[in-house]
């Protein structure tokens, strides 16, 4: 076990992350959409066919806003390069995801990613490390999106004074604040993941064997491989686009997600939505276990006329 007291916050904060590029095609966009359940219940769904097919003569397929989570897939691997940050990779948990969308994504392109440290927090027996990825369209230089990943590093805390634990953030505290209302939801959408959902989603680039290998799943304490948390987020975003945005993904301005519990492929997902002005607070539950697995909010640019 590494001596976590050796972690030097100043060295961590001063670390420069390498810049990366991410190239994708329409095939990748369509594969991602299928991976998060698009057209899973209805292959000719008029709200979702546009994510996988040039519907009604459209020139390009549309891109789901959560597709941007793929831009920063390799970011976590850079944690091992951070000086004096000691942790066991097997004890890493993906806690939260925050996304800002600045313009609709092109159906194909090359993305230039710039990664910075957004937060570092000593929790005593663990630490929280937050990485922010700003993604630019390489050809035009335009900023397309920002993804902030919060990871919980179990066993990697205790590097600061216990009476005043170290904490650093470069973003507003209330940006990740949310509460689930006790009132009746504005909308409820039920969808069902497929038994092969994780195997399909992993083809978008997340090859963690926890989501495909039965032995790894059991070693981690699960009865079988579990679904990717970001796949569940894709299901939630689709539900909100369908029910609140009336099928228009470009209405989404930002997305916040807090991962609460695992999902087994094949389980039914119920997304409950509450409308608060231009904010949609949501919660995803697994129907079979009646447990909340994901919660957060989506900020909208505007409301669909039919919702007003």
Image (cartoon, rainbow, N blue to C red):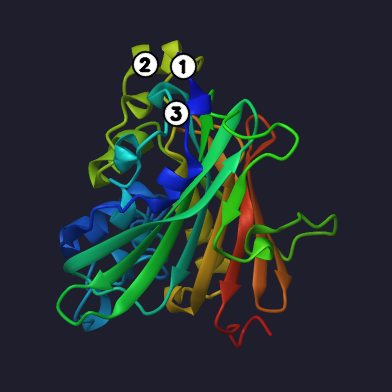
Which residue is located at x 32 percent, y 30 percent?
Answer: 208
Of residues 50 and 297, the one drawn nearer to the viewer in this rendering: 297
* Quarter of the figure with residue 184: bottom right
Question: Which residue corresponds to mark 1?
Answer: 220
User: Is residue 199 shown to the viewer in this render?
Assistant: yes
Q: Which residue is mark 3?
A: 226
Determine whether 7 is above or below 149 in the image: above
Q: Residue 22 in the image: state x and y as whole percent.
A: 19, 58
Task: Please name whichever residue, 105 or 56, is drawn nearer the observer in this view of the structure.
Answer: 105
At x 41% / y 18%, what residue is drawn? Answer: 217
Q: Looking at the image, can residue 271 be seen?
A: no
Q: How many numbered dots are placed on residues in this image? A: 3
SS class, disc 3: loop
Q: Is residue 280 above or below residue 287?
A: below
Asked whether disc 2 touches disc 1, contact meaning CB atoms under 8 Å apart, the reply is yes
Q: Mark on residue 216?
A: 2
Q: Position of residue 72 (x, y in %)?
A: 32, 53
Q: Nearer the viewer, residue 20 or 197?
A: 20
Judge left or right: residue 12 versus residue 21. right
Mark 1 neighbour density, 10 Å: few (under 14) some (14–19) many (20 or more): some
Q: Nearer the viewer, mark 1 or mark 3?
A: 1
**Picture coordinates of residue 188, whole percent (x, y):** 66, 57
Crowding around mark 2 (Cα neighbors within 10 Å: few <14, some 14 to 19, many 20+) is: some
């Amino acid at each position: 076990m590494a001596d976590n007291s050796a972690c030097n916050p100043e060295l961590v904060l001063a670390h420069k992350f390498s810049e990366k590029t991410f190239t994708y095609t329409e095939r990748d966009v369509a594969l991602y959409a299928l991976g998060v359940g698009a057209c899973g219940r209805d292959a000719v769904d008029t709200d979702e066919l546009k994510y996988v097919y040039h519907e009604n003569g459209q020139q390009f397929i549309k891109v789901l806003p959560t597709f941007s989570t793929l831009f920063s897939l390799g970011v976590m691997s850079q944690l091992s390069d951070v000086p004096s940050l000691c942790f066991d990779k097997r004890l890493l948990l993906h806690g939260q995801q925050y996304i800002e969308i600045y313009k609709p994504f092109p159906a194909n392109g090359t993305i230039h990613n710039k990664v910075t440290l957004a937060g570092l927090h000593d929790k005593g027996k663990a630490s929280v490390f937050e990485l922010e990825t700003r993604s630019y369209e390489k050809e035009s230089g335009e900023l397309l999106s920002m993804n902030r990943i919060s990871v919980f590093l179990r066993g990697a805390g205790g590097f600061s004074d216990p009476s005043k634990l170290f904490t650093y953030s470069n973003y507003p505290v209330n940006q990740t604040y949310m509460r689930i209302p006790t009132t009746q939801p504005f909308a409820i959408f039920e969808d069902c993941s497929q038994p092969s959902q994780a195997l399909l989603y992993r083809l978008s680039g997340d090859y963690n064997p926890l989501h495909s290998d039965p032995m790894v799943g059991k070693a981690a304490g699960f009865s079988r491989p579990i679904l990717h948390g970001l796949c569940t987020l894709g299901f939630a975003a689709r539900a909100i686009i369908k029910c609140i945005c009336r099928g228009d993904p470009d209405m989404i301005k930002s997305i916040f997600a807090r991962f609460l519990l695992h999902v087994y492929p094949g389980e039914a997902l119920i997304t409950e939505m509450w409308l608060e002005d231009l904010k949609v607070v949501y919660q995803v539950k697994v129907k079979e276990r009646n447990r909340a697995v994901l919660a957060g909010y989506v900020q909208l640019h505007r409301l669909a006329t039919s919702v007003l």
